[in-house]
Amino acid sequence: MRIDASRLTPLQSRIAAIALALLALVIAYFLLLHWWFVAPLLSVDSQMHDLQQIHAKYAAAIAEQPLLKKRVAELERGGATVGAFLSASDPSTASADLIQRATDVVAAHAQEGGGCSMPAKMPIEQDNGNAPFRRVSVSITLDCGVQPLAAVLHDFDRGLPYLFVDDLTLARSPTGRLQAQLTLSGYLRPTGAVQ
């Protein structure tokens, strides 16, 4: 459909001319200014904003450093690490101690609602490589009621030495209780550390 310019009134011609001029200005702005000057500046502004946020985060962490060093020194003086590590000095003895600890915890909850037993336990060989702390782990299978299992896991988590439960898998056992397979781990005290 063609518009015949001779049929437009002078007012319509001016409006059409202004609309075309505005359209030409918008196109010229995007072709000549925006993509060459404005868009790169907006990108730089966004990057500066991100860097300012990162700088503020690190500045806050650096500002807390003296307070954190003071807190760590207080904890070290107060014996925060006493009892945190396994008492044995070699991995095989530590594995046996870890299994005995697990047996004692399970026995303490054996008579609670639904009972709890430990049908399987086995040390896990680990290569700690150059890690500063040597990890000792045992694989344990528990057959427990819901409440005794929660109590056993709570005792593992809250006691000393610090123990860590990894790879927890739960399934319904044939007895109707829960069967939990898990890896229980602790760390040997680093050589040369104060007991």
Image: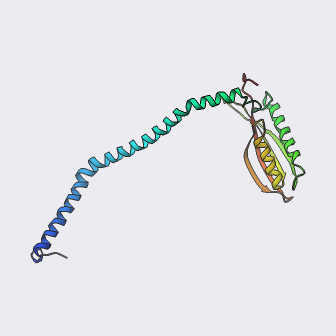
Which residue is nearer to you in this view: 2 or 17? 17
Q: Is residue 174 above or below residue 123?
A: below
| Residue under the image location 80 percent in, 29 percent down | 88
Instruction: Identify the residue shown where x is 83% and y is 43%.
Output: 121
Q: Position of residue 31 (x, y in %)?
A: 24, 54
Position of 111 compared to 22: left or right? right
Name the residue: 29% across, 49% down: 38
Is residue 7 toward the left or the right of residue 68 in the image? left
Q: Residue furthest right?
A: 111
State the image coordinates of residue 25 (x, y, percent, origin top left): 20, 58
Q: In x, y percent, where is residue 181? A: 78, 49
Relative to residue 166, is residue 6 depicted above or below?
below
Which quarter of the image is occupied by the C terminus? top right
Q: Report whether 70 appears left or right of 98.
A: left
- The correct choice, above or below, for 33 with respect to 71 in the image is below
Quarter holding residue 134? top right
Looking at the figure, which quarter contains the N terminus?
bottom left
Does residue 132 show up? no
Q: Quick check: 53 above or below 73?
A: below
Does the rendering let one see residue 133?
A: yes
Total numbered circles = 0
